[in-house]
Image: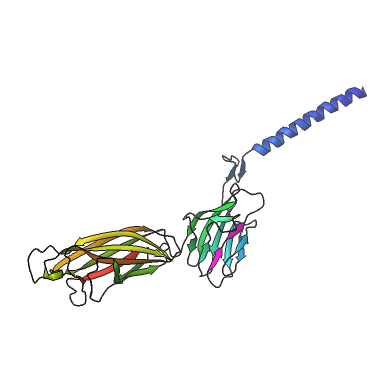
């Protein structure tokens, strides 16, 4: 009798254990609903979601920061421009997402692939990401497989504003050089916010109708635009314009006009560049090429503009 009861109890407990195991497995595999009885995804929230923020006190210059168990960080502390070099993620976490909010008026630069390597940032521009203006934000996500953060999205207080840089020549200039020489007043130095800038150049003037030995001129003006980054010089565009086509002696100078309109140039955001225009004369017995807005503003001008 006792043995029969013991066997019955053993069977009962086996069923209890089996049912508990199945119930635990079902709970582990179940979809979770918050404020809903019928979740349709692994996590279904019927309502609002709040992420508590945490203060992140940084220094001027370089910063290597930890990302604790918060997802939203407000940055305070810097009294000058500052950098974020690396971010330490939570241990063994893949896909961690954080948002940084700069509450200072100073520029926040996310250093692309910092030299320390691990836990550095891969910026979408393939270069440093410079965010200017108070309350600029950036959202990043950690990829455990490559041990790097990627920029998901960002806002920039100044990048949305179109910046225009320009220079206009007001003095009379001329050249008869067969080699390229710098054209006065046609240079701009800037630090772009965007990876592509657009350059427009507009030039006009006259060429003397007689060239060397007092013979008729058949010449043209030749122009080129250079991009200079530190000691690296690149020719980015060239254009020319017929300046004279005289086959007889005349006392009337011939006008010329040359344009380069919204030409795109690839640049690195945050890297200072110099754009410089050069000119020369070419052709058959070219005369003196002139740009004389001071003495003849109705026939001459020169200007360069950059749209960032």
Q: Nearer the viewer, residue 115 or 108?
A: 115
Q: Residue at x 20, y 71 (%)?
A: 290
Q: Is residue 208 visible?
A: no
Q: Nearer the viewer, residue 107 or 224?
A: 224
Image quadrant where one finds the C terminus: bottom left
70 to the left or right of 229: right
**Residue 75 on image: x %, y %:** 57, 65
**Residue 196 on image: x %, y %:** 39, 58
Give the residues in magenta: 81-94
Give above or below for 89 relative to 75. Answer: above
**Residue 106 on image: x %, y %:** 51, 69
Q: Residue furthest front?
A: 213
Q: Quadrant of residue 25?
A: top right
Give above or below for 50 relative to 272. Answer: above
Q: Is residue 180 visible?
A: yes
Image quadrant where one finds the N terminus: top right
**Residue 5 on image: x %, y %:** 88, 25
Q: Quadrant of residue 241?
A: bottom left
Q: Residue at x 32, y 63 (%)?
A: 225
Q: Is residue 84 magenta?
A: yes
79 to the left or right of 27: left
Q: Is residue 30 magenta?
A: no
Q: Nearer the viewer, residue 141 or 221?
A: 221
Q: Nearer the viewer, residue 16 or 105?
A: 105
Q: How is the image coloured?
A: rainbow
Q: How many marks?
A: 0
23 to the left or right of 168: right
Give above or below for 123 relative to 201. Answer: above
């Amino acid at each position: 009798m006792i043995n029969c009861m013991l066997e019955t109890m053993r069977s009962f407990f086996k069923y209890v254990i089996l049912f508990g195991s199945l119930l635990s497995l079902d709970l582990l595999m179940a979809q979770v609903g918050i404020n809903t009885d019928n979740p349709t995804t692994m996590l279904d929230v019927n309502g609002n979601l709040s992420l508590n923020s945490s203060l992140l006190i940084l220094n001027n210059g370089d910063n290597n920061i930890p990302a604790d168990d918060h997802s939203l960080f407000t940055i305070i502390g810097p009294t000058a421009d500052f950098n974020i070099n690396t971010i330490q993620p939570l241990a063994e976490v893949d896909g961690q997402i954080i948002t940084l909010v700069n509450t200072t008026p100073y520029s926040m630069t996310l250093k692309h692939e910092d030299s320390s390597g691990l836990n550095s940032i891969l910026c979408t521009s393939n270069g440093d990401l410079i965010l200017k203006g108070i309350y600029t934000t950036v959202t990043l996500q950690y990829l455990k497989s490559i041990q790097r953060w990627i920029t998901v999205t960002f806002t920039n207080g100044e990048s949305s504003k179109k910046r225009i840089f320009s220079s206009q020549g007001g003095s009379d200039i001329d050249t008869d050089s067969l080699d390229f020489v710098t054209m006065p007043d046609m240079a701009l130095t800037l630090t772009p916010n965007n990876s592509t800038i657009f350059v427009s150049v507009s030039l006009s003037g006259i060429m003397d109708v007689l060239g060397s030995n007092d013979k008729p001129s058949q010449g043209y003006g030749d122009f080129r635009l250079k991009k200079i980054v530190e000691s690296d010089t690149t020719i980015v565009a060239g254009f020319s314009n017929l300046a004279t086509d005289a086959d007889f002696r005349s006392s009337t100078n011939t006008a010329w006009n040359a344009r380069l309109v919204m030409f795109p140039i690839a640049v690195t955001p945050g890297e200072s560049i110099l754009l410089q225009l050069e000119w020369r004369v070419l052709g058959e017995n070219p005369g003196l090429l002139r740009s004389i807005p001071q003495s003849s503003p109705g026939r001459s001008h020169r200007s360069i503009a950059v749209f960032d």
